[in-house]
Image (cartoon, helix red, strand yellow):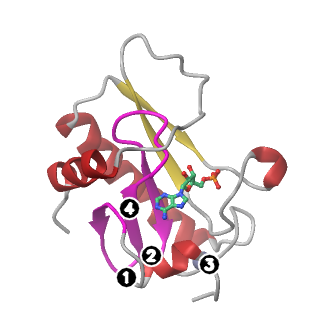
Amino acid sequence: MKNDCIFCAIAAGEIPSFKVYEDDVVVAYLDINPVSEGHTLVIPKKHTEGLLDTPDETLAAVVARVKLVAAHLKKVLPCDGFNIAQNNGEVAGQTVKHVHFHIVPRYKGDDPLVFKGAKGDMERLAALAARLAMPR
Ligand code: AMP
Ligand code: ZN
């Protein structure tokens, strides 16, 4: 766990999150500034900064969970499709330096090029996380 890393603190359960899924390798939780309804982040519990310093085995395990969570979101939300985004470096829009994958659900009429989020309503996010909670 890296000191001062907010996603490490979430993974350790030290600060709350709108959790959707957790197992030994990953935690998935709603983004608090969602781009769309159900916008979810999937992170490995073990800290690395981005794609390039994350071991291949970890990436393989995390992407398998991204698939699992995306399939669940598609069915339960339901959404019509989704984007996976993974930003590396400030110039690429990375604001949190703990590797993470965005699952951005898309609905008919959405502009698929828009990745700008807006501050979410906390009560709404809590209710949505409860509705989307997945068994291990
Ligand atoms: P990126 O811009 O790819 O680094 O994405 C970081 C994302 O983390 C942003 O979309 C933020 O809205 C989101 N975020 C930051 N802090 C939290 C938090 N405590 N819980 C959930 N999402 C967060
Ligand atoms: Zn971290």
Secondary structure under badge 1? loop
Ligand 2 within 8 Å, label 3 CB: yes
Ligand 1 within 8 Å, label 2 CB: yes
Image location of residue 91, percent across then percent down: 84, 47
Name the N-terminal-most of marks 4 and 3: 3
- Residue 94 tag number: none
Name the N-terminal-most of marks 2 and 4: 2
Q: Are marks 2 and 4 in contact (CB under 8 Å)?
A: no
Nearest to viewer (mark 1 / mark 4): 1
Nearest to viewer (mark 4 / mark 3): 3
Mark 1, residue position: 13
> How far apart are labels 2 and 4 at the CA level?
10 Å
| Badge count | 4
Q: Neighbour class for label 2 at 10 Å: few (<14), some, many (≥20)?
A: some
The one nearer the camera, 125 or 48, is 125
Mark 4, residue position: 28
Q: Which residues are magenta?
A: 17-45
Which corner quadrant of the figure contains ligand 2? bottom right
Mark 2, residue position: 10
In the depicted structure, whether residue 95 falls above or below residue 121: below
| Amino acid on which the number 1 mark rests in the picture | Gly
Q: Are marks 1 and 2 in contact (CB under 8 Å)?
A: yes
> How far apart are labels 1 and 4 at the CA level?
12 Å
> How far apart are labels 4 and 3 at the CA level?
16 Å
Image location of residue 83, percent across then percent down: 50, 34
Name the N-terminal-most of marks 1 and 4: 1
Mark 3, residue position: 5
35 falls in the magenta region = yes
Image quarter where the N terminus lies is: bottom right
Secondary structure under badge 3? loop
Name the residue located 36 percent from the left edge and 73 percent from the top edge: 16
